[in-house]
Amino acid sequence: VAKQKPLFSSVEDTTSVFATLLEKGPRLQPRAYTICSSSKADAELHVVCAIAELPHKQRGVCSAYLADLQVGDVVRGVVKPSAFRAPITKAPVVLIGPGTGIAPFRAVLRERAAALKGNGASGAPWGPARVSSAILYFGCKRRDEDHLYRDEMSDWDCTLHLAYSREQKHKVYVQDLMRKKNNSEALASAIIDGGGSVYVCGGTSMGSAVLEAVKDALEARLKDRAQAEKYVQSMHDGGRYVQELWS
């Protein structure tokens, strides 16, 4: 039997091959995280993300990288414009962001709170000059497990609705709270009477369920499903219904 030659004759050969493979292979796509702080209210830039727990005790590449950073470490990143824009004229806003979807709305409400207190943010886009009132829907599993920013929500000047999905036998989500009679009427009033805007951030399935809940609220007010759907479409077209969703 002929003696087989080794595939690599030296460590240098092996290193060269792996370097070539890495260079030719697909690059990791950048991860996008929504900033949850306001430049008008915070001296630092904050983000919130969940650590992706994968099979075989693996963790998400970027979320684990962020979790393992130490004070003083340098992180490379790019800041891109948000899809969320404050109302042009003074109007109420309805903010719906369960889980880490709370990120942009924390920024919004911290900025508005700072403006209301006169902390150098009186002319801020999300200040009271353009946001007359705010309604926030937030959801998580349990209040003592994953209620993000629980200790500071009381400082946000908003009407707060909290859905804890696992604290009772039947699961309760933000869209379920939106369908409660008083909440549904307040939602329709903010949108129709106040000319308010709706902002949604979170998973795609949640976004779909919330959209139907908004249509239900408007249908109860307009007495016609087709008119409710037409109204929501006009909100989309006019930038008054904005979603930032992920799967």
Image: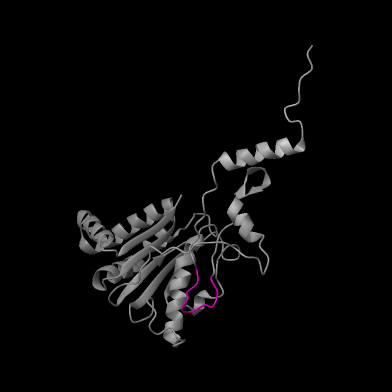
Residue 205 appears at what percent x and percent y? 42, 50
User: Is residue 57 visible in this depiction of the protein?
Assistant: yes
Magenta includes 40? yes
Q: Which residues are magenta?
A: 36-45
Which of the two residues, 145 or 48, is positioned nearer the viewer here?
A: 48
Comparing 39 with 25, the one in front is: 25
Q: Quadrant of residue 166?
A: bottom right
The location of residue 209, given as percent across then percent down, is 38, 54
For this rendering, which residue is in front, 92 or 174? 92
21 lies above or below 163: above
Q: Residue at x 76, y 22 (%)?
A: 5
Task: Residue 157: tell me if it is visible.
Answer: no
Residue depicted at x 49% and y 62% = 78
Q: Is residue 99 above or below residue 122?
A: above
**Image quarter of residue 9:** top right
Report the residue that reaches farthest toward the bottom.
118
Q: How many marks?
A: 0
* In this view, 227 is above or below 17: below
Up the image or down, 31 lies above or below 113; here it is above
- Which quadrant of the figure contains the N terminus? top right
Q: On the picture, is 115 further left or further right than 213?
A: right
Tell me residue 80's x, y (percent): 44, 63
**Residue 223 is a magenta residue:** no
Q: Nearer the viewer, residue 218 or 73?
A: 73
Q: Predominant secondary structure in magenta?
A: loop
Image coordinates for residue 214, horizontal then vertical, percent: 32, 60
